[in-house]
Amino acid sequence: MTTPSTTPDLRGHTAVVLHAHPDDEAIFTGITMRRLADAGARVVLVCATDGDLGEALIPLRPHETLAGRRLLELERAGDILGVDRLVLLGFRDSGLPGWPQNHHPMALMRQPVGTLSRRVAEIIEAEQAEMILHYDWRGIYRHPDHVAVHRIGRQAARLAGVTSYEATVDRTHLTRLGDNAHLVHAAARSTDVPFGLFPSEITVTLRATYAELSAKLAAIVTHASQVTGEAVAHATFPDAYRFEWYQRIGPPTVLETLTEEGIAVGSAQVRP
């Protein structure tokens, strides 16, 4: 891992980060969010659903709901990652493909993309953000809510006229590490599809410093209702989680000024 010698001053710059469920922000963009915040950028986290269909791995308190617990975990993780503003879109977790909850009227996957894209674009414009982070075209592993977030984020970026960074994972890298090195392995098995993209399709890769990786781990395990410490705190954690990968849609932004030592720009050319 690297230790950048200088950090650009990004005060006055804003990034909007759009995710499907509480915990996705830590798993897929935690390094990026922490680095932006440390450089002085404003980080606005938008979470589309309450994640109420996740399996509770810890006992809930009397009268506590899983959605309520996950919101608390999201707020705590946001504090660790440097979030300045948290926006909740208020929809229900759609569940995995084929689940009956896919048909709930408040499920994210049933919402009009155009309506939600305009809502997110309004957030981008009100914040005067110059970028939005969301997911790649397959939602990383084809979860219906992730696919919806991709479509919403891509269209919102077009409406607001900003660059989008579509979070993904390097399929080749994670496959090399083994079947359980990253949480995305189990997630992809649940949807029975390939995950992520090949290296040639990735435009931007961030490589964590020790402090950034520590923050990412702390944020992930804060989501204790969904992730056990044993699931991530293993010998392969640094290799599996020290990178964050994106396809950039649009021109470069200040994200790519965050030191040559800590950021690698790939050769893939991706256009709107």
Image (cartoon, rainbow, N blue to C red):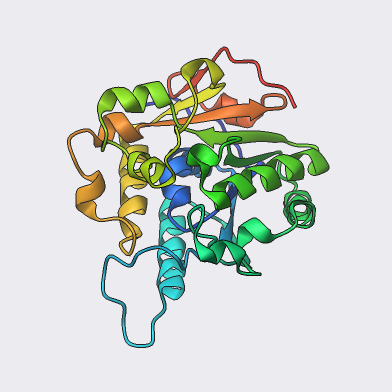
In the rendered structure, the answer to whether residue 176 lies left or right of residue 269 reads left
State the residue at coordinates (60%, 37%). 10
What residue appears at the point 32 percent right and 87 percent down from the top-left corner? 62
User: Where residue 236 sits: x, y (%)?
Assistant: 22, 33
Figure quadrant of residue 46: bottom right
Q: Is residue 251 left or right of residue 48?
A: right
Location of the N terminus by quadrant is top left
Q: Quadrant of the C terminus?
A: top right
- Relative to 155, say whether 254 is above or below: above
Q: Residue furthest top?
A: 267
Q: Is residue 69 visible?
A: yes
Residue 39 visible to the viewer: no
Please tell me which residue lies in front, 89 or 179: 179
In the displayed structure, does residue 181 sit left or right of residue 115? left
In the depicted structure, whether residue 232 falls above or below residue 90: above
Image quadrant assignment for residue 255: top right
- Residue 162, percent from left and from top: 75, 37
Image coordinates of residue 155 in percent, x first then y, are 75, 42
Identify which residue is drawn at 56% across, 52% down: 145
